[in-house]
Image: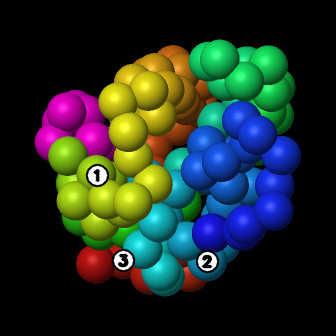
Amino acid sequence: MNAGKGPGQGPIQEAAEASNTSVGVCDFCATLRPTWRYEAQPFVRSLAGTGVVVLWDDLWAACDACHLLIEADQWARLLRRHKRLNPTAMDAVIAAETAALWMQFEQFRTGPAKRIGGAVS
Ligand SMILES: [Zn+2]
């Protein structure tokens, strides 16, 4: 986590930046080396209470565990997983914001998940 950012630009802003480097980190739980990618229409979203508007790009990465939860429509369990793996980054506001963001992702998804690297499991 970067110190020295202005007020109101904490973990949510960093999560947004993580999306733009989605080849290396799962966009849903932030673990390394995601194995799935999703395509979506880019969308903008203003972050609750911050006035910050973030452009979410068209490529989302997911690890195996998150992929299974996404495919099963288990968003509440996905959020619990995210909280468990990122305990210092989550408070109630961020959790609500994250859940809302994922709903928007689901809405803007353009197709099925694809294996990164094209390998078939
Ligand atoms: Zn994940």
Give left or right: position of 10 versus 77: right
Dominant secondary structure (helix, strand or loop) of the stretch shown in magenta: helix
Quick one: 120 or 11, which is closer to the camera?
Answer: 11
Amino acid type of the residue tagged 3 in the rendering: Val
From where the camera sits, is residue 76 visible? yes
Give the magenta-colored segment's residue range. 70-79
Determine which residue is flagged by label 3. 120
Above or below, 73 against 31 in this view is above
Q: Reply yes or no: does residue 71 show up in magenta.
A: yes
Q: How far is the residue under mark 2 from the one under mark 1?
A: 20 Å
Mark 3 nearby-residue class (10 Å; few <14, some 14–19, many ≥20): few
Is ligand 1 less than 8 Å from the beta carbon at label 2?
no
Above or below, 82 against 57 in this view is below
Amino acid type of the residue tagged 1 in the rendering: Lys
From where the camera sits, is residue 114 visible? no
Q: Which comes sooner in the sequence, label 3 or label 1?
A: 1
Q: Nearer the observer, disc 3 or disc 1? A: 1
Q: Where does residue 43 sit, x and y in percent of width and height?
A: 75, 25
Is ligand 1 less than 8 Å from the beta carbon at label 1?
no
Q: Reply yes or no: does residue 86 show up in magenta.
A: no
Give left or right: position of 113 versus 38: left
State the image quarter where residue 85 is shown. bottom left
Q: Nearer the observer, disc 2 or disc 1? A: 1
Mark 1 nearby-residue class (10 Å; few <14, some 14–19, many ≥20): some
Secondary structure of residue under mark 1: helix
Determine which residue is flagged by label 2. 24
